[in-house]
Image (cartoon, rainbow, N blue to C red):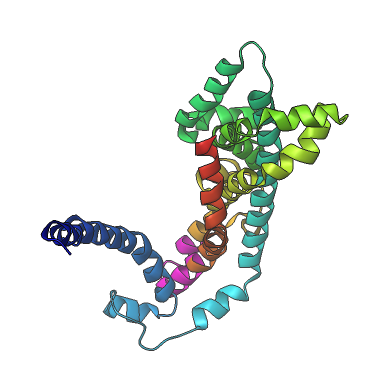
């Protein structure tokens, strides 16, 4: 081996000082993100006296009373039922309305199409806090205040901008030749939509569905504005409100509050982790489109 080649190999093996820094930053970010979750989860196995004596320590002893108490509480399962109803209905509405709107914006040519797409994109800059007062007044006028529909319909509306932004590029990436071939075989626009486009758009639909489900499950402000001031009993409030109410009522029992909080966030966390690859795949398809 020549001296030039040997020098090139050594240069290629030269230690990159930037690589450990990247790993260090990644570890710090992971610790900041995962640390509080682990603290809350482990804290559910501790008594209040143990938490007060050593807030940063491990359970000594490990107790399961808090978890058993919460899991056998009808109130907790009522909160779970409410969250499931709201999350499933909101997700279904977002996916159905989003794919139909995205199909028109992506595959049809008409005047004002770009302006309509820009309008949906502008919805990303319109936070719920700005619409809190007019939304509350509107729901009261429509008789939806204090009902699940009063949370589901605005939840769909506020999730549509993100859904449209993801799905439109995804649908535009589907070749026009497929639609032309389907038309030659006698398929209508709706036939192409149902038989060809929907199966091809499955990764994007799964992505927006997961994002809508997690956002609805963790949603706090909208249920607070609509449900907490209505006539529904606390047993039928969604979990974010249930956690707040439980922590207020049992503020002296810190271990039970941490157990309740852990059980409230576990379903969304597990659901998100199981579908992580599908989310990345759907977003990658949208970016390529």
* Camera-side residue of 51 and 248: 51
Say if the magenta span includes residue 260.
Answer: yes
Q: Is residue 9 above or below residue 201?
A: below
Residue at x 50%, y 35% (from the top left corner): 128
77 drawn magenta: no
Q: Which residue range is magenta in the image? A: 246-261
Q: Residue furthest bottom?
A: 61
Q: Nearer the viewer, residue 22 or 176?
A: 176
Q: Nearer the viewer, residue 3 or 73?
A: 3
Q: Quadrant of residue 34?
A: bottom left
Give the answer, above or below, for where 147 lies relative to 15.
above
Which quarter of the figure is the N terminus placed in? bottom left
| Residue placed furthest toward the front | 2
Q: Position of residue 108 (x, y in %)?
A: 69, 21
Q: Is residue 27 left or right of residue 223?
A: left
Residue depicted at x 76% and y 27%: 180
Residue 103 in picture, x, y percent from top left: 68, 29
Quadrant for the C terminus in the image:
top right
Residue 148 visible in the picture:
no
In-image side of 44 versus 158 (left or right): left
Relative to 209, is 287 above or below? above
Q: In the image, residue 54 lies at what x, y percent? A: 27, 78
Q: Is residue 6 left or right of residue 268?
A: left
Along the line of sight, the residue nearer the viewer: 238 or 25: 25
- Residue 193 screen position, x and y as percent: 77, 34
* Prevailing secondary structure class for the magenta stretch in the rendered image: helix
């Amino acid at each position: 081996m020549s001296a030039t080649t040997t020098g090139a190999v050594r240069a290629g093996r030269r230690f990159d000082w930037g690589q450990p820094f990247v790993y260090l930053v990644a570890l710090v970010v992971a610790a900041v993100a995962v640390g509080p979750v682990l603290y809350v989860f482990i804290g559910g196995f501790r008594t209040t006296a143990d938490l007060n004596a050593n807030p940063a320590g491990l359970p000594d002893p490990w107790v399961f009373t808090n978890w058993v108490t919460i899991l056998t509480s009808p109130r907790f399962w009522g909160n779970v039922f409410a969250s499931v109803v709201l999350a499933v209905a909101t997700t279904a509405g977002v996916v159905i309305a989003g794919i139909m709107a995205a199909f028109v914006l992506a595959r049809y040519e008409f005047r004002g199409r770009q302006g309509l797409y820009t309008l949906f994109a502008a919805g990303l800059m319109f936070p719920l806090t700005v619409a809190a007062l007019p939304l509350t007044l509107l729901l009261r006028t429509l008789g939806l205040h204090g009902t699940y529909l009063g949370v589901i319909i605005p939840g769909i509306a506020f999730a549509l901008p993100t859904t449209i932004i993801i799905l439109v590029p995804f649908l535009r990436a589907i070749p026009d030749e497929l639609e032309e071939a389907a038309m030659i075989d006698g398929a209508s626009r709706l036939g192409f939509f149902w038989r060809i486009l929907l199966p091809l758009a499955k990764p994007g639909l799964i992505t927006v569905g997961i994002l809508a489900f997690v956002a609805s499950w963790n949603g706090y402000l909208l249920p607070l504005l609509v449900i907490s001031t209505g006539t529904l009993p606390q047993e039928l409030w969604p979990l974010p409100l249930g956690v707040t109410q439980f922590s207020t009522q049992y503020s002296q029992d810190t271990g039970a509050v941490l157990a309740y909080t852990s059980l409230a966030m576990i379903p969304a966390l597990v659901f998100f982790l199981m579908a992580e690859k599908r989310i990345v795949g759907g977003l990658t398809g949208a970016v390529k489109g």
